[in-house]
Amino acid sequence: MTQIAFPTPDPDILARRDDIISGLAALLPPECLITSEDERRAYETDALTSYRRLPLAVVLPRSTQEVSAVLCYCHSQGVKVVPRGAGTSLAGGAIPQEDAIVIGVSKMNRILEIDYANRMARVESGVTNLSITDHVMPEGFFYAPDPSSQLACTIAGNIGMNSGGAHCLKYGVTVNNILGATLVLMDGTILQIGGPALDASGLDLLGLIIGSEGQLGIVTEACVRLLRAAEGARPVLFGFDSSEDAGACVAAIIAAGIVPVAMEFMDRPAIEICEAFAHAGYPLDVEAMLIIEVEGAQEEMAMQLERIITIAKAHHVKVVKESSSAMEAALIWKGRKSAFGATGRVADYICMDGTVPTSQLVHVLARTAEIIDTYGLKVANVFHAGDGNMHPLIMYNANDPASQALAEAAGNDILRLCVDAGGCLTGEHGVGIEKRDLMRHQFSKADLDQQMRVRAAFDPEWLLNPAKVFPLDERVPVDAPVPRKERAAA
Amino acid sequence: MSAFLPKDEAEASDYVKSCYASGQSLTLMGNGTRQHLGRPIVTAHTLTTSAMSGITLYEPSELVIRAKAGTPVSEIEKVIAAKGQMLPFEAMDLRHVYGTQGEPTVGGLTATGLSGPRRIQQGGVRDHLIGVSFINGRGELIKSGGRVMKNVTGLDLVKISCGAHGTLGLLAELTFKLRPKPETEATLLINGLSDARGIEALCLAMGTPYEVSASAHLPSGSTRDPAQTLIRIENFASSVTYRVEQLAHALKAFGVWEILNAQDSAQLWHKIANVTLLPSSSALWRLSVPPTKAAACVAQIKAHMSIDYHYDWSGGLIWVSCATDNAAASMHIRAAVTAAQGHAILIRAPDQLRATHPVFEPQSEAMMKLNASIKASLDPKGLFNPGRMYAGL
Ligand SMILES: Cc1cc2nc3c(=O)[nH]c(=O)nc-3n(C[C@H](O)[C@H](O)[C@H](O)COP(=O)(O)OP(=O)(O)OC[C@H]3O[C@@H](n4cnc5c(N)ncnc54)[C@H](O)[C@@H]3O)c2cc1C
């Protein structure tokens, strides 16, 4: 039983599939066009694997000009387009639909320019997140946003979702680390937004595009900010007998004027799952654990840790475990960053991503446990505590449709809870198809209509990633431009 | 022409609805300390947010504050300073620049989106703005973002509200994330470097692990000799001591660095932030370029005209002051920033000059078309600050 609806494919487009494919074939060499069913399968879903739709075709352009040519063609033919990076979206943001082509940026993966003096890199958008950091690390630099999927996910997808990561507490999320982007609009227009200089001129279009989930245009290049890495970094484990203590400790650290680089939370089920996978030395006799990372020179880290440990002690910390070597530190992060994968070995799961004010963390955790109980399910909590970005991993059995339905219903209840606690539906994974129908819980009709009107300023015909983010009914606000078909008929 | 002074969102929304019905345009204002920023405009009415004032939420342990648009920035700064916190982007105060009086509001700060020296390290106004409510051109109250640090729900209308100079909506309430105020600060200072050498030192400093929070170069000129190159560290006291030492060592090739104590450092950066070191009667430009292109950009301008100037943001932010009667200045400055892959705003000039020369960086035709669609989607009748940024927008 699938809970999330897809729009009915446009029969006219399906009937014209052969024509459309020959149209595309005229624009690109054969290795850039995927049409066989076998090969299209690789693109039918993303990391929300319980939903899948086979696209009409997949196009893998090699340049901004090719993207522009393909979009221009699709625009003229009224063909829908789903942009794709690496397909690691957890929200179904990159899941195609049968009457759409996928445009993937995987062949555009070059680093074009590294400029240490200006602390900037210019990259093609299909480059993976981690490869930028890998490239500049020998010089002591890094690209800050670090989603756990960073080995695979692309800058294109990061921009699509405004992705975050464990170290965003200090360094900000994607939108705070992108200086410029090349954007191709649905009609093929190529726009250069921002660039190597700070504070792009004119309206802040970068801020609008980042996190727009592939609905406004296709990003083909980006100028990203590089930062110099700290002298050293040290993650420390803090084990607590209760989530309450751990949550209160987080709030107290921030109130004391300390913003560590990262403050990650795991509850007992998450600790057990991750420890079994990574053997990171996590304490197994605690109910909650925080990974707190400090940065700086040895003495600076020691001083900060001393302050943090004093606060933790006031909150009844049971275990404090400092990493004593670079290897141990790496293992601590490996355990945390493989939390989703490790959970996936134990059970199927869906990952929620609501954010709540940090003062509400304890309340929301307790209510989450109650909700999960009501549905007779299991949950592991592992999340970015410093910024209140929760990640309950709801475990279920994907072979049992009833179990999946229960998990989705529990997830929806938890997200409503986050919104009601003063937070939001998604902190970093995006709305995609997954939370589309909950948008009305967070936004008023006027809010959503306004967002859709702005969306229509970029893509009046709703051809770009059209089944995402906004509830499927009531899509086009009254005063939006007339859809292309009616216009053609008129 | 009448002046509206709504006391809350509901009243403001009613005013806008009536303007929507009549098609009469509105100048949006806070307390008017930056009213001379942007192209001169003429509208049927003025709407002032002065009476929509007050902090509506402050959670120190969550590093978040929310306030009505008309709230004085000084009120916010005072309240958060009492809890050891700050607005990370180092809000500018432009009263000196414009010779205006009154209390700058947080709505005006957001609408103009200009950030101070710490922007180079911590990000700008838009990076810390996490929630807005605004009244669109139909008179509807729209919310975007919220009060949590991480939020990617729906299309983000928060960032674009910042720096739109009131052309997209009437800001009603704003939520910012804060940072703990560092325990102390110090500034490294060296005299006598050329522009290029000074900026080279700044770029190197920014590339060290010592978290430089501001970096400026003040060249020698009519009011100063020799040039000063400045690098600020803010942190816990012991870290400041350590980092200043390390930096002076790392940059010893440039000479011997003096250290300014916390008080002198704070005073100096206050002046740099608020551009009080440049003449106050001239035209004033704000240029943003990649730091390594800044010195050449200035040299190109100087080849054509006489200017006073200084650099902030590792060299990338150039404040240029020049005579107001130089009609070619705009052309030379625009050409130089374009060559440097940057952009410029004419911050201060007589109305006549701002009416006849672009104030904001000219945009491509395709970009203007998109801007116009975005404007129309938010303000379909073009009621708000029409033409403030670009003609017809
Ligand atoms: C194990 C695991 C761990 C994860 N951990 C994190 C985490 O810590 N933090 C986090 O934020 N996310 C995390 N994610 C989610 C996911 O990795 C991010 O959303 C990531 O940014 C997606 O990148 P991608 O290249 O896979 O993009 P895709 O999944 O292919 O696409 C993501 C969205 O961007 C759009 N898009 C793709 N390319 C373009 C383009 N060129 N132009 C415009 N739009 C485009 C797509 O249409 C889609 O809406 C995790 C996922 C997994 C599977």
Image: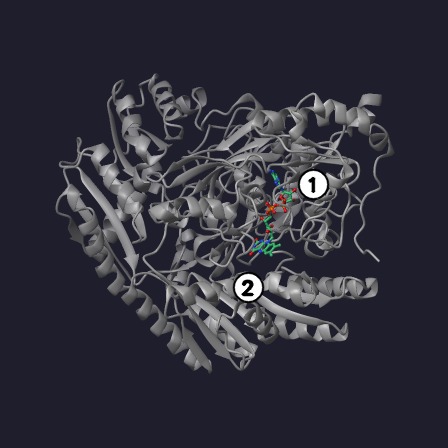
Picture coordinates of residue B248, whole percent (x, y): 18, 51
Vertical side of B365 occupied by B251: above or below: below
In-front residue for pair B182/B197: B197
Please state if B26 lies on the left or on the right of B316 as rendered.
right
The type of residue carrying mark 1 is: Met
The type of residue carrying mark 2 is: Gly
Vertical side of B382 occupied by B328: above or below: above
In-front residue for pair A2/A130: A130
Helix, strand or loop status at disc 2: loop
> Quadrant location of the N terminus of chain B?
top right
Picture coordinates of residue B78, whole percent (x, y): 38, 60
The image's colour scheme reads: one colour
Picture coordinates of residue B51, whole percent (x, y): 52, 51
Residue A417 seen in this snapshot: no
CB atoms of marks 1 and 2 within 8 Å: no
Picture coordinates of residue A343, whole percent (x, y): 63, 65
Helix, strand or loop status at disc 1: helix
Please state if A248 lies on the left or on the right of B272 as rendered.
right
Give the labeled residue for mark 2. A388
Give the labeled residue for mark 1. A452
Cβ at disc 2 under 8 Å from ligand 1: no
Please state if A120 lies on the left or on the right of A357 as rendered.
left
Mark 1 or mark 2: name the one nearer the start of the chain.
2
In-front residue for pair B38/B328: B328
Q: What chain is tagged by disc 2?
A: A
Q: What chain is tagged by disc 1?
A: A
Vertical side of A26 occupied by B96: above or below: below
